[in-house]
Amino acid sequence: MAACLLSLGIGSWCLNSGIIRTGTLPTASFTGRNKFKFEPKALVVSGIRFSGNLETKASKIGATKASSIELTERVSTSAQVDQLKKATSYLFRTKSGALVNVKVEKKKESYGITVYVSSLQLSDNDSRLVMVWGVYRSDSSCFLPLEFQDSETQTTETPFLKNSSTDLMVGLEFDGKESPFYLSFVLKFMSEGRPNGLEIRSHRDSNFCVPVGFSAGHPLPLGLSFETEGLLNFSFFSRHSKGVILCLYDDSTTDKPALELDLDPYVNRTGDVWHASVENTWNFVRYGYRCKENAHLEETNVKAEQILLDPYAKIITESVSDSYYLGSLLQEPAFDWGDDACLNIPLEKLVVYRLNVKNFTQHKSSKLPTNLAGTFSGLAQKMHHLKCLEINAVLLEPIFSFNKQKGTYFPFHFFSPMDIYGPSNTLESANNAMKEMVKKFHSHGIEVLLEVVFTHTADSGALHGIDDGCYYYKGSAKDLDSKSLLNCNHPVVQQLILESLRYWVTEFHVDGFSFLNASSLLRGVNGEQLSRPPLVEAIAFDPLLAKTKLVADCWDPHDMTAKEIRFPHWKRWAEINSIFCYDVRNFVRGGGLLSDLATRLCGSGDIVTGGGRGPAFSFNFIARNSGLSVVDLVSFSGHKLASELSWNCGEEGPTNKSAVLERRLKQIRNLLFIEYISLGIPVLNMGDECGLSAGGSPLYESRKPFDWNMLTSPFGRQITQFISFMTSLRSRRSDVFQRRSFLKPENIEWYASDQSTPRWEDPASKFLAMAIKAEAEEEEENQSLADPKGNLFIGFNASDQSENVILPSLPEGKEWQRLVDTSLPFPGFFSDKGVAVAEQMPGLVVYEMKPYSCTLFEGSSPNA
């Protein structure tokens, strides 16, 4: 910012110190980063317009009663004015109704400024009109010094002349190298009767102010946009700020802006959006904003002089002091997507693996180069593990730029991945590495879904200080006390979220999103619950998001609990089913009701039924990134873990007792078995396939990096193979396990151990079996298959006693084959081909189910 010698404004008290210049006017030039020097340059001030044939094209930017400014672009079409590049006109109104038209004309190396005044009557013959003017950038009350000849004033006076149309006119010319800046002026009547002059201001009682070397720009799109001829358009929302300063940096080695532009509210503001179009003649590399006199600034931790990050910046860089972030003026590099396209895997066929990008490959056992470990590139290198599990979708824990102290669930920016996920720990490398990862995953049939947090931000460095009254809740309710809870259904925040989602889909080819703390998306601008929240509806019907998966997850990172709600869906929104998790855990440990288990097995119709949704809209999980891992669920319990519904299987923590270890292994098999044979989408959490433990801690911070050596352990080998088998089974029997619609009631029969009716509401009942008949239409659709679909029988025994199960009779030519019995030793507890079950007598098959076990039988031809 240019140094200011005196804090002078253009006013009657300072006009007396000005001098009149009629033949020679200054031009401006920089002598250093912070010195702005004006030098004399001859310019004839007359009533003759710039020669040439001008064609006018007009568009209004704010010609309202509040501003009365019109913007007109004049483009040269004559060879006589080759140097004239563009003319922009600003029209003002004085209090008396006179019109002041200012034309700013861009030439090759200079700017010509012509001021016309019309409809202004001079009071007498000796009256004359002068323009008292100065230039400024960052502070309209502090003009840059006019250092020419022997003057030390910051303003100068230039007389008007009459042109051929009787309008009054004055012309100025400035060297183009010094742009951008503002020309600010007032008019003054000078006469013998008024030696001090009579000041004329705009109808707003303010100075006339026009940008030079930059234009008003346009309010949309928000953020930074690159235009033709090297123009950069900046657009920034702030309703409650009295002023906004655009800060530009010409290198990355200092936190001091090279140039600051105090955006004029009547030229550079449309509605609540501040905007400017700047020529990048200085080779600026970064930018930020400062908000002046923000009505909500005192309620935040943001200081008035703090530089604020553009919420819509696509590339961000950390400041030299590492205390805040700035937007980058670099264009995003082009990426060759080749023939990559949206996989659009049907929702019901998804098999999801949730992971943390850093923890997945950070451990030294990944054997990746240091620069790849814990990055998107490292994740792409380990895709073979996902293929072994037969996964076709990964759900990445939040990757948006986040607060390093609080973690991934507290973002401060919604348009950039965290820089640590790039091989060189820069945002540019993170961008490219993520695109390469998505492209590689798509080529192998794996979709990429993102967990996203749009309900709160980090406590600092995010949207704070821009317009907290719009971006954040300011209610007095207990759950609205946080200064970082986003006002999601406010139109401004809604627009930000939609633009962010579209960006990740169009620029990164992301296939879907899981929205954390989704219950808060239903909150109105005053904290009230909405039955039809505009944001959720807008996301559901957005055309650019039409092929993406949308999943509501009501888990709240603030209090680590799930909120169960009726989520409005418009046939588009699926849900992370935490009730499935709790009911299955409860049953496997010997509690709960049979009716609860049956509901989860059949697709959680109590949650996703009606309105065009089916079981495929239920995302089922046993363990997630918070709470206990699967191996800890069967190893730790106690009153502190009561909410986890865990059971230590007879001894707390690590043990060498074979009976306890065997029981724990069966329980892990049972939990995973139920997850994969239930209707809905199974979601496996990172590390559960190899027994990753957090030592019984349910805290997210206690989760450890993935240890790749554990995959080769006996536990890792058998569980990984079992999950792969169950995934293949789901695909082979898609008629049952991969359905968008619910099973028909007439095709399901429920049994107690003696084939009696289950005691649904009896807490003491711990055995349930279900027989599923293959639907005729499904068989017809698959007549060409070598392996026709057969009936299924599935048993669940959560008691500590064996149960003799009578399997229902099969059609002639079919026999029961055991596919799974979780009580058997590895590798015999599951089989692709199946093991025939002998009949005790013709038409009667009785099978002994061991304690804490699950079984699966399929009716097949003997030689199938």
Image (cartoon, rainbow, N blue to C red):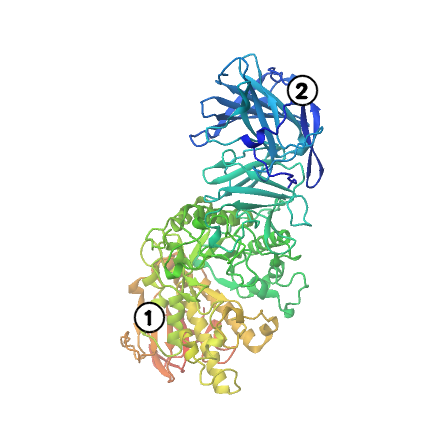
For residue 706, what is the image quadrant? bottom right
Q: Which residue is mark 2?
A: 23
Q: Position of residue 438 (x, y in %)?
A: 57, 54
- The three-letter amino acid code for the residue at tag 2 is Gly
Above/below status of 727 relative to 424: below
Any part of residue 241 in sight: yes
Above/below status of 181 relative to 341: above
Q: Badge 2: how crowded within 10 Å, few (<14), some, or many (20+)?
A: few
Q: Position of residue 393 (x, y in %)?
A: 51, 59
Q: Position of residue 663 (x, y in %)?
A: 46, 82
**Closer to the eye: label 1 or 2:** 2
What residue lies at 47% left-to-right and 25% top-to-bottom? 94
Disc 1/disc 2 C-alpha distance (Å): 93 Å
- The three-letter amino acid code for the residue at tag 1 is Asp
Q: Nearer the viewer, residue 845 or 518?
A: 518
The numbered mark at residue 596 is 1
Please give left or right for residue 464 compared with residue 756 in the image: right
Any part of residue 546 in sight: no
Quadrant in the picture for the N terminus = top right
Ranked by sequence position, the earlier of labels 1 and 2 is 2
